[in-house]
Image (cartoon, grey):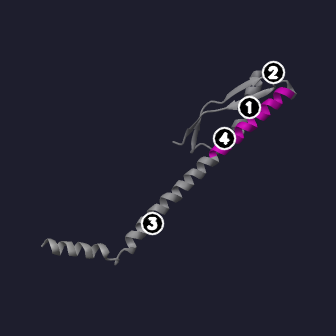
Amino acid sequence: MFCICKLAANRFRRSNEGITAPMFALSFMIIFLGVGLAIDTGRAMHVGNKIANALDAAALAAAKGMREQGLSDDEVRQLAGAYFEENMKGHVSSYATLGTLSVQIDRRTSTVTVGTVVEAGR
């Protein structure tokens, strides 16, 4: 009895008939997961670049306003916030949650540093 079961198991293990559908299903799942990961990674990179560009634009505009127009600290913060909001319109809402904008002003070196906290999508 044991010998017959062993022979049947060996024959089943070596058989290549009917293997196409399971192999296709496994391959399809792996490819599907890879494509999903690529799409999510691309979206995350796009959002990260968009946030970095908006922060850069806000810092440049605020520093220029401070130097050339003699804006007060509050006006510099408002200008940085306005530029950041304008550059971020419609780009991040479903992918990330942005914290409050932080603006550091150094009048001695005429620099403005702008930053925010970003939390991953909901």
* Element type where label 2 sits in the image: loop
N-terminal of the pair, mark 1 or mark 4, is 4
**Which of the 4 image quadrants contains residue 69?**
top right
Q: Amino acid at mark 3?
A: Ser
Q: Which residues are magenta?
A: 47-67
Up-down relation of residue 105 to residue 29 (above or below): above
Residue that numbered label 1 is attached to:
80
Find residue 52 and report its horizontal and vertical position in percent: 68, 40
Q: Amino acid at mark 2?
A: Arg
Q: How crowded is the residue under tag 4: few (<14 C-alpha within 10 Å), some, or many (20+)?
A: many
| Residue 104 in the figure: left or right of residue 42 | right
Residue that numbered label 4 is attached to:
51
Q: Nearer the viewer, mark 4 or mark 3?
A: 3
Residue that numbered label 3 is attached to:
27
Q: Residue at x 78, y 35 (%)?
A: 60
**Which of the 4 image quadrants contains residue 93?**
top right
Q: Is residue 15 magenta?
A: no
Find residue 9 and report its horizontal and vertical position in percent: 24, 72
N-terminal of the pair, mark 3 or mark 2, is 3
Nearer the observer, 64 or 88: 64
Q: Residue furthest right?
A: 68
